[in-house]
């Protein structure tokens, strides 16, 4: 640091892109970096902490590559990986919503509002608009790729919770087996073999007492 200059002074003098388009995209890139700080409820596979949304997005992207051949529809795998990478971008702005909480009922509305505001804030960027379109493709199940990514998005937490029963979000939030099974059944047609395995996992987690039994009445 030069004599007579503070850290604040140095920060105000940092180099910035001169090109307006590059400057906006650089700003957006740093904006979505906040996804690394958004904590989810699901545990990582082998430790006591929860995964972040950024970690989940990476894991989902790799899962597409690993499990693509189990999709019930023909996939453009590269397109599906792209959807997986951006599917949780709204959580930069609204945070994560636990799927078994009452707040899940307002999640879609909140995320749509956030994504539209994101596009408005970067109205000159075709790249940001493209991310919005890809998120919509996933969220509204508009393509085979969107449907498969949605299915894996449902199934990965099942596999993570079962691999880490001690720190399972199922146990922490008293989740019932039928709640998890209902979500699996909702995506079963997009990857039946993976869904069948996930159902076996649910049965065993219920046997072990990690998932609560079905609500009576």
Image (spheres, helix red, strand yellow):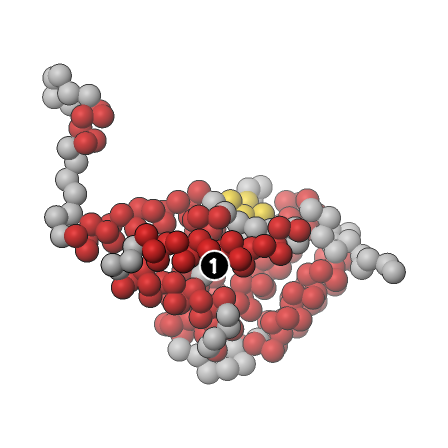
Q: Residue at x 38, y 67 (%)?
A: 133
Instruction: Give how far across and how far down residue 27 sits, in percent.
Output: 27, 47
Q: Is residue 65 left or right of residue 192?
A: left
Question: In the picture, which quadrant includes the C terminus?
Answer: bottom right
Q: Look at the picture and state if 170 lies above or below 3.
A: below
Q: Is residue 135 visible?
A: yes
Left or right: where does residue 79 sit relative to residue 206? left
Q: Quadrant of residue 90?
A: bottom left
Name the image quarter holding residue 16.
top left
Name the residue at 47% across, 75% down. Answer: 142
Mark 1 lies on residue:
112
**Neighbourhood count class around disc 1 (C-alpha, 10 Å): few under 14, some 14–19, many 20 upward:** some
Say if 185 sits above or below 53 in the image: below
Q: Determine whether, in the image, residue 186 is placed left or right of residue 26.
A: right
The residue at the far right in this view is 217
- Up-down relation of residue 97 to residue 132 (above or below): above
Instruction: Name the spot of residue 146 as percent of width and height, x first.
Output: 47, 72
Which quarter of the figure is the N terminus placed in?
A: top left
Circle 1 — which element?
helix
Q: Horizontally, is 195 left or right of 9 in the view?
A: right
How many discs appear?
1
Residue at 69%, 66% (x, y): give it: 182
Q: Position of residue 157 (x, y in %)?
A: 58, 57
> Residue at the spot x=58%, y=47% of the render?
41
């Amino acid at each position: 640091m030069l004599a007579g200059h503070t850290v604040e002074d140095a920060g105000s003098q940092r180099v910035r892109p001169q090109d307006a388009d590059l400057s906006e995209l650089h700003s957006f890139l740093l904006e979505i970096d906040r996804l690394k700080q958004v904590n989810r409820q699901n545990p990582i596979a082998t430790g006591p902490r929860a995964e972040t949304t950024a970690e989940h997005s990476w894991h989902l992207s790799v899962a597409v590559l690993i499990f693509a051949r189990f999709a019930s529809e023909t996939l453009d795998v590269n397109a599906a990986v792209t959807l997986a990478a951006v599917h949780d971008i709204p959580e930069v702005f609204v945070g994560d919503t636990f799927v078994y909480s009452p707040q899940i009922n307002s999640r879609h509305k909140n995320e749509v509002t956030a994504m539209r505001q994101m596009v408005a804030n970067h109205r000159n960027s075709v790249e940001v608009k493209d991310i919005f379109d890809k998120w919509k493709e996933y969220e509204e199940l508009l393509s085979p790729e969107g449907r498969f990514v949605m299915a894996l998005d449902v199934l990965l937490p099942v596999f993570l919770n079962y691999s880490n029963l001690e720190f399972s979000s199922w146990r922490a939030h008293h989740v019932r087996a039928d709640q998890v099974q209902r979500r699996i059944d909702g995506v079963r047609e997009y990857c039946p073999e993976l869904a069948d395995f996930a159902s076996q996992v649910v049965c065993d987690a219920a046997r072990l007492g990690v998932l609560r039994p079905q609500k009576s009445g």
